[in-house]
Amino acid sequence: MLHEEFFEEVKKSKYGMGPRRNIKWGTSMMLTEHVAMLRDYYEEVKMEAKPELTEFDYVTISETMEIAYQSKADIKIKRWKDGQFIYNRGIIENVDLKRRVIDLQDPFYLMNIKLDDIVDVTIMD
């Protein structure tokens, strides 16, 4: 009798456990090493592989950046860094081919972007 009363109370609780269900344990019942390993695993799963660009892709990126630089057009740059894609938008202020860096001026600050990280460039006019 006590057993049935207990499960009736549990069914009414916010956890929604029935007599045949398992209890889901939160991270508070896990070892810190396990939590760290799970966190590393999820970060690794979220990472995207760097796309392999062809010669045609490099030529297209170069031409688009040259047009944007000469016309001072607003561009969107898609770059790959540390397993994820980052998008930046702004105007190309300077191109330094020795250091392989461009200076991109967005509304708030001037940032240096490595040419090797750039995956795609789009003119936003």
Image (tube, rainbow, N blue to C red):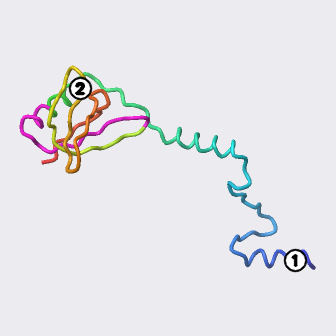
Between 76 and 56, the one lying in front of the other is 76
Q: In the displayed image of the protein, which residue is found farthest to the right? A: 1
Q: Give the range drawn in magenta.
A: 66-83
Would you name the residue on which mark 1 appears?
A: 4
Between disc 1 and disc 2, the foreground one is: 2
Task: Give SS at disc 2.
Answer: helix
Residue projecting furthest to the front:
109
Which label sits on residue 43?
none
Give the amino acid at mark 1: Glu
Could you tell me how many numbered marks the image carries? 2
Considering only order in the chain, which callout, 2 or 1, is on the residue closer to the N terminus? 1
Q: In the image, is 47 to the left or to the right of 59? A: right
The residue shown at (27%, 44%) is 88
What residue is shown at x 22% (from left), y 37% (from top)? 121
- Residue 118: x, y in percent? 28, 32
- Identify residue type, mark 2: Tyr
Q: Residues within 10 Å of mark 1 (few under 14, many from 20)?
A: few
The answer to whether marks 1 and 2 mark residues whose Cβ atoms lie closer than 8 Å is: no
Residue 72 x, y percent position in the rendering: 9, 40
Please provide percent x and percent y for residue 5: 86, 79
3, above or below 65, in the image: below
Residue at point 26% right, 28% down? 115
Picture quadrant where residue 101 is located: top left
Check the image and report above or below for 10 versus 78: below
Residue hosting label 2: 58
Give the structural element (helix, strand or loop) at label 1: helix
